[in-house]
Structures are given as structure tokens and as C-alpha cells.
């Protein structure tokens, strides 16, 4: 086995596992980052969406050998770091918007949905409904009908550009 | 072998205050467990870590019907590394059952395999590789038996009902037009995004604790006690965060919990059984397929005079909840319409397919699709509009249902209908689509260049239509169900002065953990934040009945309020001061105080389960839906672009959560109507993965506008009726009506796939007779009434073809409560 080095939510990590082990399993089982979910294991549902150097990927389809030297971001890294000792971390505006607009119901698609939305906003995405639908088209939700997820992302885009 | 360094998680700042900025009216507190779900800290079953846990797997049948002669083990495999469980290891009854004792936990050697993917044996190993190898080292030896796949041919009847009112023959005698039609619906998969998952942990007392994704902790508790011979304490069920249920985690978790528990008890270690998507779709319950036949008599003024309805549901291989699903389907089969002479005959039969079970709507979406589509065809047959025929027959207060139930209160069918059609501008939309159809029909027959070309433009080949549907949904359990359940909800003032709600009602996204504290806080006069909710753990909470049937807000919510009112009265009597000011002092002085509130029958509600007479439900919820579609006439593809949904739920507790229920249910109904199709071959699901069983994505989903209507239910202290299932009943018939409006063809079978639409268009096109009415009504003749109306003509010409009308109508306009939606215009939907 080979040691793979990369960063997860800004922290340098090293893991010594078979190279074809799924990034999803490395995150969930080796790093105990269980915020990233498995819904189908074949890249259809998007529940395991994480950002690889800022790009949206399904962690169930990425072998860990492909992430050597990259930066991985997961839902656990969305809430920002504290400003200093004694100061608590803050929710990402997207998380706040999902909470306020009702974008999360059962919550199982939410981590992946948030990461896809984060990538969309980071790329300069705005409140346009059409564009938001396109951005989350790879993430299935069975609870919401997507309406309030779209509302939440639009809301967060307003705050990001305010 | 793994090294990782990460800083400890930091505390989070959550938004304070309760104001909701979404589109919903008014305020509602933020979702109670929302922060955990949004930060990834919520623990679903597969996120729970039990050191030393083994992995479990199920050996399943690959045949639909066979006798199990034996389980052959490969002697070359080292069996000391794994634990194998067969039916012989079950200490108690080899039964998992809610109604009829017909389903084994594992098929015993010598027993009959009744369906593909039926559990035969269980394996557990310390690691996944060993487990995988063991699965290939065991083989079932079987003797095939002849299977039955057609529910109409099966002679094994799980349940049957007959509901009758008035004089059917006299009704048909009065009829001026009689129309017959048969409607079919297939399986639908719940497709919660979290698969079924259960982890069993052996207890020191010889029992087992199961942690899992589930709707009904006490169903599992009962199943464990029976098959494993455990007492109330030894059988211990804890709900993990649950990633969606929709009925799919009502009963299936019982057998999965038993499997995990049997393995855990045998190997003495925690055992994880986390299904992958393929196993979940292959083996777990689906919505019942159904065949519904209507024969209806109507007068030319639009008055319904006779309904003769036959419902046949496919129960699959075991009884499961089928009798109750069928019952609800039968009770809703006529639709929300007044008709004096009715006969509804319903039966559910056994086939050698995986058992069907609960799915949002629970029998009603099947029969209401048939009822609504048939009503639209009746309207067409007497040249009446779909809105007008509903206005003339819709239930109003004082009307009597086929079971003899007089609808006395909370009857809002008319209101939801009018609110939906007004918000959607339904009649104006219909005029426009009729004009567009007429223009297209003219082009198709006058030789306009390009009209018949294989390369016609997107605009030319896209037909737009608008459809309307109306539905009712009985609130709470059917018949005497709530009385039999005798549910309990409790509230406790702890010795430390905390207020805690104790119920077995689970959170699976619908908002239980938010609305219960809201209701209790209101009743106690304390802030929302002051009320806690206990975990859904059978060692802590009472049996509040299952979290199903849209009963949680209405029934259990009512119990929570009553318990809170009693707690408040007890404290205020003792202290002489308002509860909010005195409860902490009371707890300090007197210690803990708990109030248990048991269900009491709603006054005046009575039902006879034997004769099917009386009040089938304490109240009904009402829903209307207007859908707009675009149909590609070349490919048969349907895009549902806009939906306006008006749902009467009695009283809105939390507008944002209630809207979320309507939106989510509506999209499931749109999927049911258009793309969700389970292909079954030789009793096996062919498209048993997410790459092949499709559900709507954000790009497939319509813009959904919700109107919440409040017609209070006086039987509940908070006047609420429940919301979860209502939208599921009404979406599919609205979409099918819209497809007809666009194309002139009726689709009699769900889903309305491109193949079915093209087939219907092809049938209608021979011979092409543009301008012909879609249905040729036949006069009823005594003794020899006409049955099936003539086949549909290809295109229904409008009476007022307005060539200057835009070819693409405006999208539906829904309510714009806060004005934060730009407008009803949607550039995304403009044709190319």
C-alpha cells in the first residue's frame, strides 16, 4: 500500500490504504467524517458530493489514488473557523439560508447539496433559478421538490454578493 | 494503517430568533434538528460507530416461487470465520407480521420461497472481504414451483371489501350517458435517499438493542419480542436520524432489525446491516400496482348518478399492510364527489413478487388517479369542462359519502378547487391551449410546410396543456384504527426543571421534532426553546402509534397539547402562578412530574369495520392541483413545467414545513405520473438501481406554488388535519389531464411514459380526423348501455381558435405571498 497525502478542509492528512479505496470510504471510515453520505454508490444521487480542488465530484466514484496532492472539502468544512480563541465558528451563509428557507428536510441529501451549491456560489453563481437548477441537477432530493433548496441557494447568493 | 490529524470541531454559532425569511406566511421556528443536518453532525444509522462490529448480509432467493430443499455450503471455505443464521436459529415464531401471520423471517428448509429476493439465510463476518467470499460459498438448492404474476388471475385473496350506497340499477336507469374505463398503475419505489439500515447490539440481559433508520419503533419492538422471545426491556429500539421514509420504512425495518438481531445474538457482537441501493430496491416494499375499472352513469347536466367501481391491487407475495392499503384505496375510489348510487368492490391478491406495502398516499393515489381521469373523460363525453363537472358534483358540507358518513365539518373541497383554478388561471390557460391545438391541427391538415417534417422545430413539435385534479384524503387511521391503537404521548417536567416531550413519533424530515415543541410551548405559555423532545427510544418514550397516515401532527400532536394543558393546570393549581413563571420552582420543590395522555375517540365518530358503514375517517383533507405540461409530439416526452397546489390541512402549524410537505409530495406525484416505472420480469425488478429507476431531478421538477387552506377540524385541539399524503393523491391525475389537454389523448396507465404517449398518439392518428371531439358520447339505452367510449380522435379542435394567440401560454401563476419570487414568468420554460 501507498501513503496518500492531501488536505481535507484545509488540514493536511496522510492515509495508507489501497489506492482504489473510494474517497467516500476514506472520508467516512478512515477520517470519521460521516457528514458525506452514500445514497447509491454509482454516481447517480450526489449524496456523497465533495469538492476536489473546488470541483464537484461524487466521492463514491473517486479512488483515493486520484486525490494525492489535492484539496478536498466536505460539509464538515463549510462552517468557518473561529476568529480567535474563545470565539465560536460560524455557519456558512448557505447553511444559514438552508435552515431559514427550509432547504433541508430529512437531511440525507443536504451535505452533498450544500457542496454542489457552494461550488456554484464560489464560481460566481447568482439567484437565477434556471442556473441553480442546473447546478444541483446531479443531486437528488426526495423530500423537498427542490423548491426550498433553490430558494435557499438564491437567498445565500444574495448574501454572498451583498 | 491510517494516520490523520485533525483539530477538534469548534462550537457553532446558530442564528437566533425564530423568524423565517422564506416564502411561507408568518413565522415558524427553525427546524429543531436542522443545524445537525446542515453541518454533517447528525448521525444516521451508517454514521454510528460500534467498535468491533461485524458486517451482516442476506442470502436471497433468485427464484420467484420454489421449494427450499437445502442450503449447500462450500466445504473449501473456512466457515469458522463467519456466522451463518438460518430459520432453525430463530428462538421464537418464524413470523414477521402486522396483520396476517404469513411472512417468515427466513424461509425454512422445506418451506416455500414466495418471491424473488426473499431472505433465506444470513451471514456475518468481521470484515467485508470475508463476508463477500462467504456469500459466494453458499448456494440454495431449490425445486421450482409454478409462479403467479397476474393479480387478476391469482386466487389467493388477501382482503376484499364491498362498499355500497343507494340503488345501483336505479342509478344507471337514470343515467343519460354511461362510460366505462379501465386504469392501471404500476409499482412505485419510495426512494428515500438513505437506504434501509439497521445495527443490532447484543445486550447483557440476553436481549438486543437495534439502532436504525425507521418510522415506527414499536412495530420493530413487537417484531423482536415475538420472533426472538424477548421481553419489553430486552427488545430495545432506537431510531437513528432517518433519511426519508415515505412509508418505505414503516414495516420493512422490522424484518431487517430481526435479521441484524439474529446475527448479533449468534456472534455476540454488534452487527451492521446497511443495504446498498441495489438490495434496497430489489427487496423492499413498493407502492401496490392496481387495476381500477369504472362504470359511471351521468346526466347531461353533469350530475353523477351511479358509480360502479372495481379495484384490484397486487399485494405481492405476503399480506404485509395490504388489507389497510386496499381499504383506503377503496374508500377513496369514488373521488370527492356526491353520488347517490355507488358500489365499490375491492380485492387484493397474492402474486409471486416482492411484497408491496406502505407508500405515501397508501392506496389512495392509485384509485384517485382512476377516479379523476375517468371524471375528465365523463366531462368530455357530455361536453362539459373539467372545472364545471367538478363544481357540479363536489362534496359540500352535509353530503354523505358511500359509507354513510355525513360530512359535517371541515369540508373544503370547493375551496381548494376554486383557490387552485383561480391562482393558476386555469380557464384562461385552457382557452389558450385549445387555440394552440386548433392552430396545430390546421397546420397538420392544410399542408403547411414543415408540419409533417421529421425536422420540425421545437416550438412546432411542443404541445402545451393544462390539467386539473381534485382529491380527498382521510385524516388519520382508517375506521376504528385510532381507537385500537390507543396511542400515548407524554410530557414531563423533570426534577431539574426542564420540559420534555415523550412520544414514539419519529422525525424523518417532515418536522415532528419542530412542531411538537411548538404545540407544547403554545399550550404551556413558554418559549419554543424551553421545550425539549426526548429521543425516539423504546426505553424512554411511550408507544404513540406508528408515524404514518398523516396522523402525527393531527393525532399525536393533539395528545401532546392535551398532556401539556394538564401539566400546566397541575403546576398552576399547585403554585397559584402562571406556569411559565412557576414551573422551575415547582420542580425544585416537588421533583419530576409526568403526564401521560392516551387517545380518546373523537366525539361522534363511529365506524363498523364489518359492514364498512359509518365515519371512515374523523375528517378529510382536500387538495386540488393544476399542472401545466409540455409534450414533445415527436418523442412523447413530457415536461411538467408548473404546478399550483391548494391543500386544506385544517390548521397550519408551521407554514414553511407544511409547504415543504406539499412541494415534496407534489414532485413524488409528478414522478409517479411521468417517469417512475418499475419494470418487472418473472417476478424480479429489472431496473433495481438508481441508474435505471429514475426520479425527478431539479431540472425535471416543475415550479411548485403552494396554497395552504385552513378549514379547521374541531376534533383536534389545534384544529389540524395532517398534510403528508394529500399532495400525493392529486398530482398524477392533474398531469395526465394536462397531457390530454396538450395532445388530445388519454393515458390510462401510469406512468405516462413517452412510449405510452406515442402509442396513444399513433392509435389516435388512424384515421386522422382533426376537429373531431375526443370522445363520442353514447346515449344510455335501458338493458344495453354503452360501455367504453369511442377511441380518442387525434386532436381536439377548440371552438374558438384564435390564430393570434401566442403559441406558448404564460406559465401558471401561483400565489406570491412575499413577493420575493420575481414573477410568474419563467424564461427557462420558453421554447427554443
Image (spheres, helix red, strand yellow):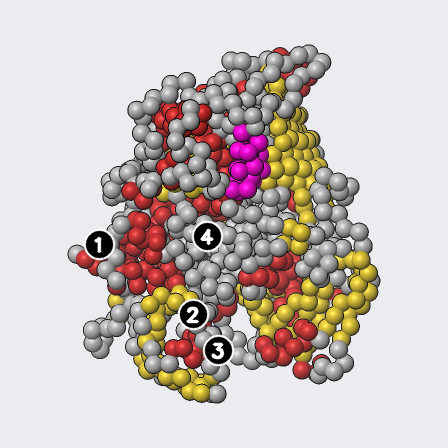
Specify whether disc 4 shares its chain with disc 1: yes
Alpha carbon distance from label 4 to label 1: 26 Å
What's the mark number on residue A158? 1
What's the mark number on residue B692? none
**Direction left: furthest residue:** A162
Mark 1 lies on a secondary structure that is helix
What's the mark number on residue A21? 3
Q: Nearer the viewer, mark 2 or mark 4?
A: 2
Q: Residues within 10 Å of mark 1 (few under 14, many from 20)?
A: some
Mark before the other along the chain sequence, 2 or 4: 2
Alpha carbon distance from label 2 to label 3: 11 Å
Alpha carbon distance from label 3 to label 4: 29 Å
Alpha carbon distance from label 2 to label 4: 20 Å
The quadrant of the image that shows the C terminus of chain B is top left
Q: Nearer the viewer, mark 2 or mark 1?
A: 2
Mark before the other along the chain sequence, 2 or 1: 2
The residue sitting at 34% across, 81% down in the picture is: A69
Q: Is residue B757 magenta?
A: yes
**How many numbered dots are placed on residues in this image?**
4
Subunit that carries the residue with mark 4:
A
Spot occupied by residue B372 in the image (x, y as percentages of width and height): 53, 30
The residue range painted magenta reads: B746-765
Identify residue for label 2.
A59
- Residue B756 in view (yes/no): yes
Q: Is residue A44 magenta?
A: no
Mark before the other along the chain sequence, 3 or 4: 3
Identify residue for label 4.
A142
Amino acid at each position: 500500500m501507498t501513503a496518500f497525502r492531501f488536505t481535507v478542509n484545509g488540514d493536511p492528512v496522510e492515509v495508507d490504504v489501497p489506492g482504489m479505496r473510494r474517497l467516500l470510504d476514506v472520508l467516512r471510515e478512515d477520517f470519521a467524517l460521516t457528514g458525506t453520505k452514500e445514497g447509491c454508490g454509482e454516481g447517480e444521487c450526489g449524496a456523497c458530493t465533495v469538492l476536489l480542488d473546488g470541483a464537484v465530484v461524487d466521492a463514491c466514484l473517486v479512488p483515493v489514488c486520484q486525490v494525492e496532492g489535492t484539496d478536498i472539502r466536505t460539509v464538515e468544512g463549510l462552517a468557518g473557523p473561529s476568529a480567535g480563541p474563545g470565539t465560536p465558528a460560524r455557519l456558512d451563509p448557505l447553511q444559514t439560508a438552508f435552515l431559514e428557507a427550509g432547504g433541508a428536510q430529512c437531511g440525507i441529501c443536504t451535505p452533498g447539496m450544500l457542496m454542489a451549491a457552494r461550488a456554484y456560489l464560489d464560481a460566481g453563481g447568482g439567484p437565477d433559478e434556471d442556473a441553480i437548477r442546473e447546478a444541483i441537477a446531479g443531486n437528488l432530493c426526495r423530500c423537498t421538490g427542490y423548491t426550498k433548496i433553490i430558494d435557499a441557494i438564491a437567498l445565500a447568493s444574495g448574501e454572498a454578493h451583498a | 494503517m491510517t494516520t490523520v490529524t485533525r483539530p477538534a470541531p469548534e462550537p457553532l454559532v446558530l442564528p437566533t430568533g425564530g423568524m423565517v425569511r422564506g416564502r411561507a406566511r408568518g413565522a415558524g421556528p427553525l427546524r429543531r434538528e436542522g443545524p445537525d443536518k446542515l453541518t454533517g453532525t447528525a448521525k444516521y444509522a451508517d454514521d454510528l460507530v460500534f467498535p468491533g462490529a461485524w458486517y451482516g448480509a442476506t442470502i436471497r432467493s433468485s427464484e420467484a416461487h420454489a421449494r427450499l430443499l437445502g442450503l449447500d455450503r462450500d466445504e473449501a471455505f473456512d466457515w469458522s470465520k463467519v456466522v451463518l443464521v438460518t430459520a432453525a436459529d430463530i428462538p421464537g415464531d418464524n413470523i414477521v407480521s402486522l396483520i396476517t401471520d404469513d411472512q417468515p423471517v427466513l424461509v425454512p428448509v422445506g418451506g416455500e420461497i414466495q418471491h424473488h429476493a426473499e431472505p433465506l439465510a444470513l451471514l456475518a463476518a468481521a470484515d467485508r472481504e470475508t463476508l463477500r467470499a462467504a456469500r459466494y460459498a453458499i448456494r440454495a438448492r431449490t425445486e421450482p414451483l409454478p409462479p403467479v404474476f397476474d393479480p387478476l388471475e391469482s386466487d389467493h385473496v388477501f382482503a376484499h371489501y364491498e362498499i355500497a350506497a343507494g340503488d345501483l340499477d336505479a342509478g344507471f336507469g337514470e343515467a343519460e350517458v354511461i362510460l366505462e374505463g379501465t386504469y392501471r398503475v404500476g409499482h412505485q419505489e419510495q426512494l428515500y435517499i438513505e437506504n434501509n439500515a439497521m445495527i443490532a447490539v447484543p445486550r447483557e440481559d440476553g436481549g438486543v438493542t437495534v439502532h436504525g433508520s425507521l418510522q415506527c419503533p414499536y412495530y420493530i419492538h413487537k417484531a423482536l419480542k415475538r420472533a426472538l422471545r424477548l421481553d419489553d426491556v430486552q427488545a430495545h429500539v432506537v431510531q437513528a436520524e432517518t433519511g426519508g421514509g415515505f412509508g418505505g420504512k414503516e414495516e420493512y425495518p422490522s424484518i431487517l432489525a430481526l435479521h441484524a438481531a439474529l446475527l448479533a445474538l449468534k456472534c455476540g457482537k454488534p452487527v451492521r446491516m446497511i443495504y446498498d441501493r441495489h438490495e434496497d430496491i430489489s427487496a423492499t416494499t413498493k407502492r401496490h400496482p392496481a387495476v381500477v375499472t369504472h362504470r359511471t352513469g351521468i346526466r347531461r347536466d353533469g350530475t353523477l348518478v351511479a358509480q360502479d367501481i372495481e379495484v384490484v391491487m397486487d399485494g405481492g407475495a405476503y399480506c404485509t399492510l395490504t388489507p389497510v392499503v386496499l381499504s383506503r384505496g377503496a374508500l377513496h375510489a369514488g373521488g370527492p364527489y356526491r353520488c347517490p348510487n355507488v358500489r365499490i368492490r375491492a380485492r387484493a391478491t397474492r402474486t409471486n413478487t416482492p411484497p408491496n406495502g406502505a407508500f405515501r398516499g397508501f392506496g389512495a393515489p392509485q384509485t384517485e388517479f382512476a377516479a379523476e381521469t375517468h371524471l375528465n373523460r365523463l366531462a368530455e363525453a357530455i361536453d362539459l369542462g373539467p372545472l364545471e363537472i367538478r363544481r357540479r358534483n363536489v362534496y359540500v358540507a352535509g353530503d354523505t359519502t358511500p359509507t354513510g358518513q355525513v360530512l359535517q365539518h371541515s369540508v373544503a373541497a370547493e375551496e381548494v378547487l376554486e383557490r387552485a383554478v383561480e391562482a393558476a388561471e386555469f380557464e384562461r390557460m385552457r382557452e389558450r391551449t385549445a387555440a394552440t391545438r386548433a392552430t396545430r391541427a390546421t397546420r397538420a391538415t392544410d399542408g403547411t410546410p414543415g408540419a409533417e417534417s421529421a425536422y420540425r422545430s421545437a416550438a412546432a413539435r411542443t404541445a402545451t396543456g393544462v390539467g386539473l385534479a381534485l382529491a380527498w384524503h382521510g385524516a388519520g387511521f382508517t375506521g376504528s384504527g385510532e381507537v385500537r391503537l390507543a396511542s400515548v404521548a407524554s410530557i414531563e417536567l423533570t426534577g431539574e426543571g426542564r420540559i420534555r416531550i415523550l412520544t414514539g413519533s419519529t422525525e424523518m424530515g417532515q418536522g415532528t421534532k419542530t412542531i411538537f415543541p411548538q404545540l407544547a410551548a403554545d399550550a404551556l405559555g413558554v418559549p419554543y426553546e424551553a421545550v425539549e423532545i426526548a429521543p425516539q427510544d423504546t426505553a424512554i418514550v411511550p408507544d404513540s402509534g406508528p408515524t404514518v397516515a398523516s396522523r402525527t401532527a393531527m393525532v399525536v400532536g393533539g395528545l401532546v397539547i392535551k398532556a401539556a394543558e394538564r401539566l400546566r393546570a397541575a403546576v398552576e393549581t399547585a403554585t397559584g402562578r402562571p406556569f411559565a413563571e412557576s414551573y422551575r420552582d415547582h420542580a425544585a420543590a416537588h421533583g419530576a412530574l409526568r403526564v401521560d395522555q392516551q387517545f380518546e375517540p373523537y366525539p361522534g365518530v363511529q365506524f363498523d369495520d364489518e359492514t364498512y358503514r359509518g365515519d371512515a375517517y374523523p375528517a378529510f383533507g382536500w387538495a386540488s392541483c393544476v399542472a401545466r405540461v409540455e409534450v414533445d409530439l415527436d418523442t412523447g416526452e413530457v415536461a411538467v413545467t408548473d404546478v399550483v397546489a391548494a391543500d386544506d390541512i385544517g390548521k397550519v402549524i408551521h407554514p414553511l414545513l407544511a409547504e415543504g410537505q406539499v412541494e415534496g409530495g407534489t414532485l413524488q406525484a409528478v414522478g409517479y405520473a411521468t417517469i417512475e416505472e418499475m419494470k418487472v420480469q418473472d417476478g424480479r425488478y429489472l431496473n433495481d438501481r438508481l441508474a435505471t429507476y429514475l426520479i425527478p431531478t431539479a431540472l425535471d421538477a416543475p415550479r411548485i406554488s403552494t396554497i395552504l387552506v385552513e378549514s379547521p377540524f374541531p376534533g383536534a385541539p389545534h384544529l389540524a388535519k395532517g398534510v403528508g399524503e394529500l399532495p400525493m393523491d392529486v398530482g398524477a391525475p392533474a398531469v395526465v389531464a394536462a397531457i390530454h389537454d396538450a395532445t388530445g389523448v388519454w393515458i390510462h396507465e401510469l406512468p405516462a411514459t413517452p412510449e405510452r404517449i406515442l402509442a396513444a398518439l399513433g392509435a389516435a392518428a388512424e384515421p386522422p380526423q382533426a376537429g373531431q371531439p375526443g370522445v363520442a358520447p353514447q346515449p344510455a339505452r335501458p338493458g344495453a348501455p354503452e360501455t367504453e367510449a369511442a377511441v380518442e380522435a387525434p386532436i381536439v379542435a377548440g371552438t374558438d381558435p384564435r390564430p393570434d394567440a401566442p403559441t406558448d401560454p404564460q406559465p401558471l401563476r401561483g400565489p406570491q405571498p412575499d413577493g420575493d419570487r420575481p414573477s410568474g414568468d419563467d424564461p427557462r420554460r420558453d421554447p427554443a
